[in-house]
Amino acid sequence: MINRHPEAQVFNSIFIAGIAGKRFDISIKNGRFSSIAGSAPDYDQPADPGTDLWISPGVIDLHTHLAWTDFDHADQLKRGSHELEVMQAQAFEATLRTGVTTARDAGGILPSTVRHLVRHYGQPLRVQTSSDMLGAADARGIRHLEKRMAGIFDTGAGWIKIMATGGLGAAAEQVLDPNFSEEEFAFIVRHAHANHKKVLVHTWGGVTVDWSIHAGVESIEHGMFLSGDQAGRLAEARIALVPTTSIYRIAADPHGVLALNPVICDRAERAAEAHSRAIGYAKSAGVRLGLGTDYATPALHGYNLQELDTLMEYGLTREEAWHSATGGAAEILGSGNELGRIAEGYIADAVIWDADPYRAPNADTLRKSIVSVITGMKEAELM
């Protein structure tokens, strides 16, 4: 199912997802799209779902946790190192199997672990990392933060993640309270950029969104209590929003796969209710939106396409949702010149489907229509 770095492959008379009524002949050489041309007129005939194929760019998940095996970190600490490694390799495999070819890990996995999993388990998932998260325990002044960030830089991570507010574990009346002082927050962003690192900010809303805009971070995550004014300023600053909508719906269900306690479920339900308004503000303002799932644990890895469903339920068109998972996500990563499109010269990260993915009624149907996943880069190039 995973087609690794095809040195030569040709698809004749294939549809490109999102381009209706036109077939293409597509060639791949050395893991990149080498030619894309319209098929001869003889092939311009109605699609036959029984025999036709569609190709789309590989999906990009901008917010996942590939190293996490348990919702409660204390449970993960009870597992042995080999068990954790096997479960993390399975997370890579499940993520690839669902059509995600690139992921940004939002804290938890080290670049060295990514290299090990790619090399020893043969799972060619492209992963950008933040290694660790700067949170409330790090609000101990500039000197402490400088030392902490030096440790993260040493891992080789390309991103710095700031836990600017609490999350599901915070009391409702405190969830927008900043974890850092404004001075500490500004230092983290400034110091990250000075060391050529990008910054993603976990924030549910409030003043830390304003700080993020002023400091010029690359993306804010979640943002369910985003205001209309803040959305306008995010758009002006070209700062992306990665809302991670579906995880809060999942967490709100006390009988769902996470089966959380009622207090957490209630907080998640209120967060989910707010998310649709935030998406509306962001869409109206023209904020760059990226797909991210915030998925962790074996119950969630491999179901990443559910985020497309929720984004559309919250107001994005199908085209907008897919763009947030492909070309738009690639631009947020800084890889828009080589990822996220079916275009000549681009890395051949792609998904082959046996039905039009733009017509799938839901993520479950979409997932079942995957024929194969193509990863263009050699495994050595991903490490």
Image (spheres, rainbow, N blue to C red):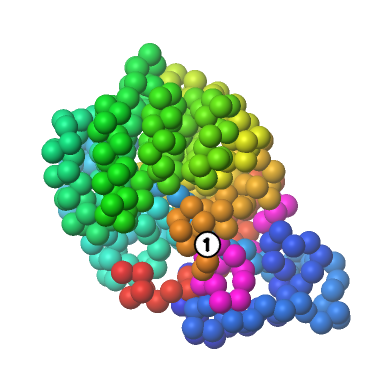
Pick the front one: 335 or 113: 335
Give the quarter of the image for residue 274: top right
Which residue is found at the position 34% from the left and 21% from the top? 177
Q: Look at mark 1 in the image and give the residue it sits on.
A: 336
> Would you call the spot at circle 1 few (<14 residues within 10 Å), some (14-19), or many (20 or more)?
some
Pick the front one: 84 or 173: 173
Horizontal relation, residue 295 to residue 240: left or right = left
Q: Which residues are magenta?
A: 339-360
Image quadrant for the C terminus?
bottom left
Give the quarter of the image for residue 8: bottom right
**226 vs 369: above or below:** above
Pick the front one: 30 or 363: 30
**272 vs 363: above or below:** above
Horizontal relation, residue 272 to residue 190: left or right = right
Q: Position of residue 97 (x, y in %)?
A: 48, 60
The residue lying furthest to the top in this view is 173
**192 vs 127: above or below:** above
Q: Position of residue 302 (x, y in %)?
A: 46, 52
Give the quarter of the image for residue 276: top right
